[in-house]
Amino acid sequence: MEKIKRYKAYCLDLDGTVYRGEAPVQEAAQFVSRLQEDGIEAFYVTNNASKTQDQLYEKLKRVGVQADKSRIMSSAVAAAKYIKRWYPGRTVYLIGSDGLKEALDAEGIERVEQQADIVLMGLDLQISYDKLSRACLEVQKGAVFLSTNKDLAFPSEQGFLPGNGSFTAVVSKATDVDPVFIGKPEIHMLEAIQQEWGFEKEDMVMIGDNYDTDIQAGIRFGIDTVHVNTGVTSMDAVMQKDHPATHLLENLGFWKH
Ligand SMILES: [Mg+2]
């Protein structure tokens, strides 16, 4: 067991950290329970923008984690909070699914089909040439261009399928405008947690399996990071980085307060 300092905000990645697909990572659920015994609710930080907070809450429940729903920070929730903070009262042309629609509704953000102030893109399984064209035209007319995450592909049973990053690239290439990405490795989700709950950075830690997204987000934001060897990036690969994670654990069962 590795002795690690106490934090107030434990920010856990989901896929590869708390579960793998539908399978639980047992040590993660036990870790969350141990925090709860100490009176601490974890935060859940995921680039997945297609699921609603309710759907992520139910999924966590299926893998044995009783989460505080208000502490589930998806890139959809973070995108809505980002718009509310930096562009209050502005309208959005949205490409995305239920997770994003619900997140915008929750912040009272108006969606429009044209003359939008902002174009926001997230994974949309009903993507079409018409939707992509509309996004391009709005961006050309000067709309702010936001995207939930830059993941080019995501794994499925059949193989890798195109992710939101690929469709965002279509609009970006066609308009020659770079979007602002909300998800990890950008800092916006961690910043939203800090803003909303009032934490000091030294009291926050980002925990995840993917060096290029989770650990990079923590490093860029300036908080401690914990890499777990239960998902994408191997521990050996992280050790060889110029900026490795603050702590490296085989899994969360090795975390001792
Ligand atoms: Mg992950």
Image: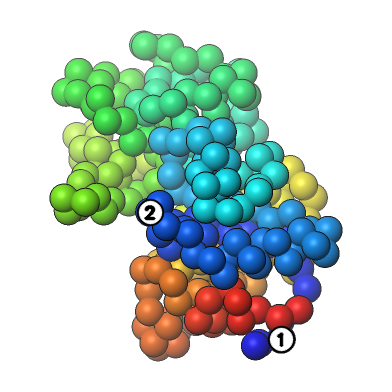
- Residue 40, given in percent of the width and then of the height, sits at 78, 58
- Pick whichever of labels 2 and 1 is earlier in the sequence: 1
Q: Which mark is residue 3?
A: 1
Return the residue nearer the eye: 256 or 182: 256
Return the residue nearer the eye: 174 or 167: 167
Q: Is residue 192 above or below residue 143?
A: below
Q: Amino acid at mark 2?
A: Gly
- Residue 244, given in percent of the width and then of the height, sits at 49, 82
Q: Residue under circle 2?
A: 21
- Residue 106, given in percent of the width and then of the height, sits at 61, 23
Q: Is residue 50 above or below residue 72?
A: above
Picture quadrant where residue 168 is located: top left
Residue at 71% x, 51% y is 194
Image quarter hosting the C terminus: bottom right
Determine crowd level at label 2: few under 14, some 14-19, many 20+ residues with C-alpha closer than 10 A: few
> Count of labels shown?
2
Q: Amino acid at mark 1?
A: Lys
Picture quadrant where residue 77 is located: top right
Disc 2 is placed on an element classified as loop
Q: Is residue 189 above or below residue 94?
A: below
Residue at 32% x, 51% y is 151
Q: Is mark 2 within 8 Å of ligand 1?
A: no
Picture quadrant where residue 242 is located: bottom left
